Amino acid sequence: VMHSATKYLGGHSDLTAGAVAGNRAFIDQVRQMAVLVGATLDPAAAYLLSRGIRTLDLRVRAASENAMKLAQTLRRHAKVARVYYPGLEDDPGHELAKQQMRGGFGGIVAIDLVGGECEAERLFNSFRLIRTAPSLGGVETLVSYPLYSSHSGFSEERLRAAGVSSATVRFAVGIESANDIIADVTQALHKT
């Protein structure tokens, strides 16, 4: 297993780190590569990572609460065709998420906009607080366009299987005031 500690573990968008776990043979291979390329955290990055881990629970819970509020608001918005969030009872993954996730349903909310790619471009140009970036797990709310970021290069078939279309927008919800996040998304949607 390879994990990006840059995201939620670090939590402040200020370091690059990762973790690897596996059987002895795999770890030995990874260790050889790490020695060759110098994949060791410097002391400052190690400090930032340990600082982030201390507040992980608080940040994930706050982001989850904000994401739920955003998802509930967006499902009632006329310019949103669909909301993807496992915390919503009508989400196809809700029952599984209830079994696996304790303390919230995470900070990722995706939507399909009415109008597709043209509306997505207008939306991205209308945010005041939220920044456009294909990341997640930080204290700040970010928005990205999966078709050009996380799912770029996917075939049409793979995009359909993943539920990603030209109308899909992804929010990585942070820990700002939920009211501020919702107000920014709402005002941006009104401009589309």
Image: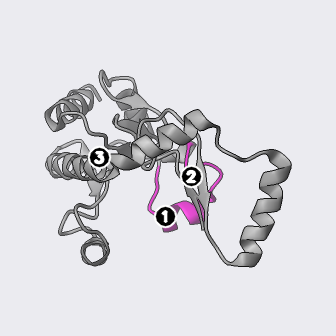
Quarter holding the N terminus? bottom right
**How far apart, in angstroms, are the residues tagged by discs 2 and 1?**
9 Å
**How far apart, in angstroms, are the residues tagged by discs 2 and 3?**
26 Å
3 or 1: mark nearer the eye: 3
The residue pinned by badge 3 equals 59
Q: Which mark is residue 162?
A: 1
Query: As rendered, which of 60 and 44 lies closer to the eye?
Result: 44
Q: Position of residue 92 (x, y in %)?
A: 29, 72
Q: Position of residue 174 (x, y in %)?
A: 31, 40
Query: Residue at horizontal 15%, vertical 46%?
Result: 73
Range drawn in magenta: 149-165
Quarter holding the C terminus? top left
Secondary structure, mark 1, is: helix
Which of marks 1 and 3 precedes in the sequence? 3
Indicate the amino acid at tag 1.
Answer: Ala
Q: Quadrant of residue 88?
A: bottom left
Color style of the picture? one colour
**How far apart, in angstroms, are the residues tagged by discs 3 and 1?**
27 Å
Secondary structure, mark 2, is: loop
In this picture, is 160 found above or below 172?
A: below
Q: Which mark is residue 40?
A: none
